[in-house]
Image (cartoon, rainbow, N blue to C red):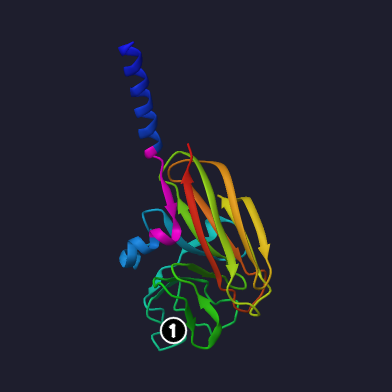
Amino acid sequence: MRKTLWFVSALLLSLSVAQAQKQTWNLSKDIQDTGNEISFSQGAKGVWYFLESSSTEHDPLTYRLMGHYGAPCDVNGKNGPFAVRGLACWSSVDVDPSRQDENRSPSVTFNFTDTTIYLSGYPNVGMPPKTVVVDPMLKKLGIIAWESPITGTIRISGFVTDLHAGGSDGVRWSIDKGDRTMLSGEIPDGGSQTFDLKDISTRQGKVIYFVIDALGDQNTDEIGTNLTIKQTK
């Protein structure tokens, strides 16, 4: 009887430990926790990266890191509309919102504060607190990448919302595993969607891409988002 009780207790303990070892990654929280430690070398919590593409093709071979970091976000070193304390941004070059040509770089912005920040010159665009904002461009995708630190099964959930109503034609979003799209959707101007993708197998070092496509619209597309990735097996 004692042996049976010992075995059951050991089994329950091992199951509890295994469950406790399952990990969760939340984009906004991980950026907040990491702070400016990712200023010059991307990788919040060692998994999150910001990229842009060289075209609108979903081809990871054409993606590159956004290597320019600004805090507070600034426009070519001047006091432009993005030079706001509490906002940090990533891009491949200095972000200049006055440019609307096809060569303008996508950007990713994060509001580190606890309040919504409204940009000077864009009074109807509010950057919500603790929220990632992706701004894709005419011929370049804005991309958030998660590099898996585990081999197992994951669940991906989150939301996308157009923060600039009246500023674009909406966007298309997708969750890609390599160059294969697993889930996608479109939101109209000012729209919002949630998503929940279950039972996704992954291996350590493999990358999941969350892609924002401006749908050929040159106007501004500030897309608020957050992602949560949970290990399920």
The foreground one among 109 and 59 is 109
Which of the 4 image quadrants contains residue 113? bottom left
Relative to 48, is 223 above or below? below
**Magenta region, residue range:** 20-30
Q: Is residue 151 above or below residue 158?
A: above
Q: Give the side of residue 146 with respect to residue 11, left or right.
A: right
Q: Nearer the viewer, residue 219 or 180?
A: 219
Q: Which one is in front, 90 or 230?
A: 230
Residue type, label 1: Val
Tell me the SS state at disc 1: loop
Image spot of residue 20 (x, y percent): 37, 39
Magenta residue check for 44: no
User: Which residue of the protein is positioned furthest toward the front in this rendering?
Assistant: 1
* Residue drawn at point x = 52 percent, y = 82 percent: 97
Q: Residue at x 58, y 63 (%)?
A: 160
- Horizontal side, residue 205 vs residue 182: left or right: left
Query: Would you say residue 179 is visible in this rendering?
Result: no
Q: Quadrant of the N terminus?
A: top left
Evaluate whether residue 231 shows in this view: yes
Q: Going 34% across and 61% down the picture, which residue do you hit? A: 33
Residue 3, quarter of picture: top left
Q: Which residue is labeled 1 in the image? A: 75
Image coordinates of residue 125 in percent, x first then y, are 55, 80
